[in-house]
Image: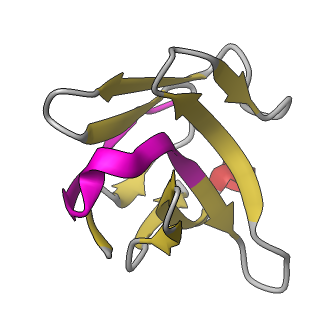
Amino acid sequence: QVQLVESGGGLVQPGGSLRLSCAASGSIDSIYAMGWYRQAPGKQRELVAVRTSGGNTKLADSVEGRFTISRDNAKNTVALQMNSLKPEDTAVYYCNAVSLRGNYWGQGTQVTVSS
């Protein structure tokens, strides 16, 4: 089992920035990808960004150029730096880890972009 604990959500004005962090614990030796998904009210959960242990990164088109994902393999953490936030970025953001044993999720953290 892998446990994921997120932090860093909150309320921010349009154009502002937030940084989300996620720490993994438990059976972390088999994790090969960590990333972030989000789910807005009435919408399906969607991929925001993912980074593999090998350093490959994928960002959703909607956040390209505004969000950056970083990962510390030694500390088993992943972070999402979100800049130039827009109201449409409002959602619950979930940390995700994929390992040989399964697919794991954090509890989610709310990000609200509003003036």
The structure residue drawn at horizontal position 77% and vertical position 59%, both measured from the top left corner, is: 46
Closer to the camera in the image, 71 or 64: 71
Q: Is residue 7 visible?
A: no
The structure residue drawn at horizontal position 62% and vertical position 17%, both measured from the top left corner, is: 56
Above/below status of 66 relative to 21: above
Residue 59 in percent (x, y) is at 72, 28
State the scheme by which the image is colored: secondary structure
Above/below status of 61 relative to 94: above
Residue extending furthest toward the bottom:
42
For the stretch drawn in magenta, what is the main secondary structure?
strand
The structure residue drawn at horizontal position 23% and vertical position 40%, both measured from the top left corner, is: 76
**Is 58 positioned to the left or the right of 99 in the image?**
right
Residue 57 in percent (x, y) is at 63, 21
**Is 13 positioned to the left or the right of 107 in the image?**
right
Dividing the picture into quadrants, the one containing residue 38 is bottom right
State the quadrant of the N terminus: bottom left
Closer to the camera in the image, 42 or 106: 106
The structure residue drawn at horizontal position 82% and vertical position 34%, both measured from the top left corner, is: 62
**Is 26 positioned to the left or the right of 82 in the image?**
left
Residue 110 in percent (x, y) is at 44, 70
How many badges with numbers are in the image? 0
Above/below status of 10 relative to 18: below
Residue 18 in percent (x, y) is at 36, 39
Q: Is residue 69 visible?
A: yes
Q: Is residue 5 magenta?
A: no
User: Which span of residues is magenta-colored?
Assistant: 15-36
Q: Is residue 27 magenta?
A: yes
Above/below status of 54 relative to 95: above
